[in-house]
Image (cartoon, helix red, strand yellow):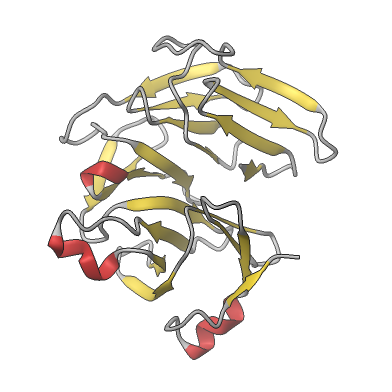
Amino acid sequence: MRIGRDGSVWVTDNGDHQVMKFSPDGKLLLTLGIKGKAGTDDKTFNRPTDIAFAANGDFFVSDGYGNSRVVKFSGDGRYLLAWGKRGTGPSEFNTPHSIAVDSKGKVYVSDRENNRIQIFDGEGKFLRQWTHLGATQNIFITPKDELWIITHRDNIENITYDTLAGRIMRIDLASGKISGAMESPGHWLHASHTGEIFVGSLTGNVFRWYPGWLSRGLGSEEGLKPAN
């Protein structure tokens, strides 16, 4: 689930291969994809995973579990372009699990099973990649261009990333360096317009974390609190 710049609520339904937009009071406004039908064309998805929004209203869907691609749409839901296929090279993915867009329009894709984040321009041109963060479950960029990520708790197949497993981290966008980290129970995260960080787990629990704890360092669970 994501909150659009206009306050709308967006949901990726990876079981029914759809992306849906709702008003804040729950009215269905837009549906993309065909219910129950997986596909690779401009009208279908195959288990989409996440959505991210550009400043001009365009949005990007990580069509992740089945298609290993990114799909770009206009703000009114018109298909614009897609890129990616399964693989390990630049612009190839193995489970693009999450996606984010910064204030300059660059697109960040959590290429989870390839243990990297790939970065593109808004037209899908590969710019660079970060391979030092391990497998990322979820990523989000705040309006202040702060990148937050959650790393995969079970990412222990490659010992290089053992110390990075199961963390929530703040990443410097310019360098890709970790500027803070603490243990995380989460699978998903989102930031509100007031700066609160919300973290969700696969068990159905939602935790709310306040960035004020950053001043004391990201070193413990102190900042994680159950959401009201």
Q: Quadrant of the rendered structure where residue 29 is?
A: top right
Residue that appears at 48% across and 46% down: 101
Task: Examine the rendered structure and indicate whether residue 204 appears above or below residue 218.
Answer: above
Residue that appears at 81% across and 41% down: 24
Q: Is residue 42 left or right of residue 155?
A: right
Determine if residue 21 is in view. Answer: yes
Q: Quadrant of the rendered structure where residue 158 is?
A: bottom left
How many numbered discs, if any?
0
Query: Looking at the figure, which quarter contains the N terminus?
Result: top right
Determine if residue 57 is in view. Answer: no
Residue extending furthest toward the front: 203
Task: Examine the rendered structure and indicate whether residue 5 appears above or below residue 222.
Answer: above
Query: Looking at the figure, which quarter contains the C terminus?
Result: bottom right
Q: Quadrant of the rendered structure where residue 106 is?
A: top left
Q: Position of residue 126 (x, y in %)?
A: 26, 37
Q: Position of residue 197 (x, y in %)?
A: 60, 65
Residue extending furthest toward the right: 25
Q: Position of residue 135 (x, y in %)?
A: 29, 52
Q: Position of residue 227 (x, y in %)?
A: 70, 65
Residue that appears at 14% across and 63% down: 160
Front one among 121 and 222: 222
Q: Is residue 3 left or right of residue 81?
A: right
Q: Is residue 88 left or right of residue 26?
A: left
